[in-house]
Image: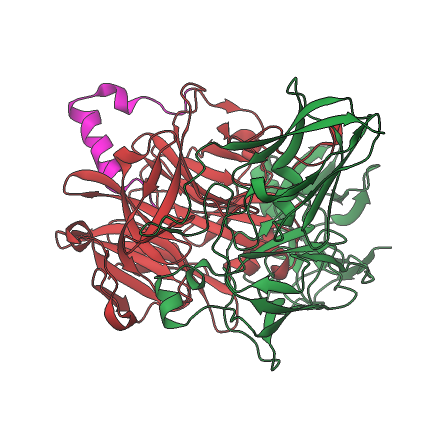
Amino acid sequence: MKLKLLACLALTCSLSISLNPAAAADLTAGMKTASLELKSAGPVAFGPQGILFVADPLGAAVHAIATGDTGKVAKRKPVALDAVDRKIAAALGTAPDKIRISDLAVNPLSGVAYLSVARGSGVAAPAVIVSVRGDKLETLDLSSLKSASFTLPSVPDAKATTGRGRRRQSARSQAITDLGYVNGRVLVAGMSNEEFSSSLRSVAFPFDGSGKPASVEIYHGAHGRFETRSPVRTFVSLNVAGQPYLVAAYQCTPLVTIPLSDIKPGAKLKGKTVAELGNRNRPLDMIVYTKAGKEYMLIANSSRGIMKVSTVELGKHPGITERVAGGGKKGVPYETIEGWKGILQLDRADDSNALVMRETEAGSFNLETLPLP
Amino acid sequence: MILAVLLLGIIPGCGRSVRDEPGLARIGLATDPDGSRYFEVTGLEGLPGADESSWRESVRIYTLFERDSSPDGLPPLAGSYVFTGGVLRFRPLFPLEPGLEYSARVYGSSGRFRETRFRIPKREVEPTTVVSAVYPSSDVLPENLLKFYIHFSAPMSIGRAYENTRLLNSQGQVVRYPFLELDEELWDPTGRRLTIFIDPGRIKQEVLPNKTVGPVFRAGESYTLVVSDRWKDAAGARLRSSFRKSFRVSGADHESPDPAAWKLSAPSAGSRDPLALTFDAPLDHALLQRLLWVESAAGERVEGAVRVEDSERRWSLRPDKDWSPGTYQLVIRSTLEDLAGNGVDKPFEVDLFEQVRSRVDSRLVRREFTVTPGR
């Protein structure tokens, strides 16, 4: 995933120069070199200063890793690597069908791609972070890097467990469907493997142990009538009319906007539905970029290729609140980018390019840098 | 036993490998007392460099996916190098994989190399894992069913759930895209239980998929959930057999479970008889283990064995100690759901126009009962 800082990064940069010297503080200062052990590696996203956030659903944690990859590169080499799955498998000494690539994120400072990978088949499979610089692949040695972790609050009730006494344990787990760094906070979207709940947590970064994370429940209001819990599949942040918003895709396909200022502890939020993506159309990743002075959002989907939406339209849309006759669509207008087929992962590579992981007809995965449409 | 094959001068596409270069270096595979294997390079005199980056250039191990294949275009194996007492040791980051071959190469200054190949014998795995249960266990399920729990007898492989789980209609045809396919499959921490949600876009009313494609289930029809025996467990063995669960579909359920309506039979003091609850409709199997418990008047949890039976219509607690006389609280977390995801706190879908029931705001719902001495 996904450059989540986007407009917020630009904001941070301008503040650091003109208004607020503290914004340029070393965010890795409180981190420790402590042989971070990942129990799993799910969604990944970059923050500032080369800090990679890694969701660890099995460890019920989010880790911040100071990759040390902070130097601007004079001439970036675009990431291009065929059969990345085979190459990662070879480096990890196993067969291609025994690795799983969960997610990818590009470091905006260097253009280097980082992939979260599981080596093995079951839940006990070790997790690895792999970097790709140009066409050169390396495994990250976490024992030599500084990191900090935040443990997600577990089961909502300590008594809500099975078994007895010391043997008491929970079969509940929290899948992390997406995470991102927005305005000094790490946002984590998740869903449970038991109750149909939704949670969006907002944790202050650096993880200094102070302040409770804000946890909100997300609801979906269909046409002002039915209201349901709605787990978030993927999200991105952007500014609409000067206000920071999340654009989130629900598991049941609507695309919604949520003001960031509404994410307060205990809040129950309803997103404003601005589009419905249609059946069998899993939104995989979203990025925001500017081209010729206009801002756009790209949505990678499982079945419809890539959708391109003007964010101005997102801001202007009053929200779908009425039943649409004949089951038609009445959301924001979008353009389907036909050439981008088989995209499994998407992130912004730089101002004018995207990095994608694409499945080939032969069934292997290629990393390609493509000009933003 | 490890088969080591020394190949000299027969490496296609990699230039020529010669006997006299790079010197007398030999590569072997050694085993630590803990069973982990590492490569050992001896006879290194004359090789360039004396630090890790030069060793990385001089000695490279490659993974070969197929027997006798070439590692061209593949990166070398990740691992660490240590040079002591004239021996260079390379420890792979992960254990070598049974069934694969590894090419160990010592490079000379001219770029020529000497190669030794090691085959790690394949480990034959017998299919032993089975589907041990599927919940809901009833053979009649509501049209707006929200999820299945598939339990396995051993940890499973991850990432292949949706290609190995199918839903068939009464004609044996595959129901297209019935499930919410998540990149992060919903396994429990042991890898033995998978949760599969029915696509909520085809359950929720007024959502596009439901309006255009319609619901997954139709009342009055019959369906079969099929788990393929091609699915591999975490050890790489297929399931011992495929699994089928057939069921009939009844009308949609939009009502919240009502704890006040549950039949409660209180045990007698001095006994270890179970406290038993009977529900008017089945509840969620997993949540019944977790979101329902009993507290004494002092607020202490009554420890005991929980059983969920009768197609998740009956819940009972057999205490570890005899019941003392007094009042107790049955405590229910209001997110306890039925098979259609209707919670005690609110239905799966709240119809804001009709407001069928007032909402339960409390996050814990309590129902008091009294344990009295038996006759």
Which colour denotes chain A?
red
Say which residue appears at 62% left-offset and 61% top-offset: A97
Residue B34 rendering spot, x and y as whole percentages: 82, 37
- Which quarter of the picture shows residue B97? bottom right
- Which quarter of the picture shows residue A266? top left
Residue A313 magenta = no
Is B193 situated left or right of B75 in this image? right
Is B1 situated left or right of A263 in this image? right
Nearest the camera: A141 or B318? B318
Q: Report the residue that reaches farthest toward the front.
A: B375
Nearest the camera: A41 or A226? A226
Task: Tell me which secondary structure the magenta stretch mostly adopts.
Answer: helix
Say which residue appears at 28% left-offset and 35% top-offset: A262
Say which residue appears at 84% left-offset and 25% top-offset: B270
Residue A30 rendering spot, x and y as whole percentages: 44, 20
Chain that is green in the image: B
Residue A372 rendering spot, x and y as whole percentages: 26, 58
Nearest the camera: A259 or B273? B273
In the rendered image, the vertical position of residue B370 relative to residue A192, given as above or below: above
In the rendered image, the vertical position of residue A261 relative to residue B1, given as above or below: above
